[in-house]
Amino acid sequence: MSEYITALVTASNEDEAAAIAKAIVGERLAACANIIRNVRSIYRWEGEVQDDPEVLMVIKTRMELFGRLEARVRELHSYEVPEIIALNIETGSEPYLRWLGENAKQ
């Protein structure tokens, strides 16, 4: 398992995403969070197909912090069931990964 992960989290709008991102980076649960605008999400919710605009956060952190990151995002998020998934970072630029590790700490 990789030491570093990218977590993907969608939010209803850019302001909500920015508030979550500032909190998790400020608390060192993540080194960085990018916010991508104009995401169109089509999903099933409560038996109906939904089609909504969202924004996507791409969050870089350590695997060991995922549990705390997930809990904090759930605390701050407006959705009943927010998308919070993690993908392993298999490899990357050594200077960047070193920076990531130094800035996402317990």
Image: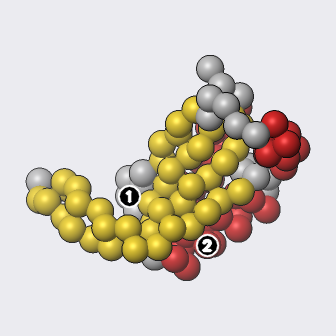
Between 66 and 39, the residue placed more toward the observer is 39
Q: Is residue 58 above or below residue 76?
A: above
Between 69 and 53, the residue placed more toward the observer is 53
Per the image, label 1 sits on a secondary structure element best described as loop
Observer-side mark, 1 or 2, equals 2
Label located before the other in sequence (1 or 2): 2
Q: Is residue 78 visible?
A: no
Q: Residue at x 71, y 28 (%)?
A: 3
Answer with the quarter of the image where residue 48 lies: bottom left
The dot on residue 58 is none
The residue labelled by disc 1 is: 80
Per the image, label 2 sits on a secondary structure element best described as helix
Q: Are marks 1 and 2 in contact (CB under 8 Å)?
A: no
Left or right, 72 with reference to 39: right
Left or right, 58 with reference to 33: left
Q: Is residue 31 above or below residue 36?
A: above
Q: Residue at x 38, y 67 (%)?
A: 39
Left or right, 103 with reference to 93: right
Measuring from the top left, give residue 40's x and y in whole percent. 31, 67
Measuring from the top left, give residue 75's x and y in whole percent. 56, 57
The residue labelled by disc 2 is: 18
Q: Residue at x 71, y 57 (%)?
A: 32
Q: Amino acid at mark 2?
A: Ala
Q: Is residue 44 visible?
A: yes
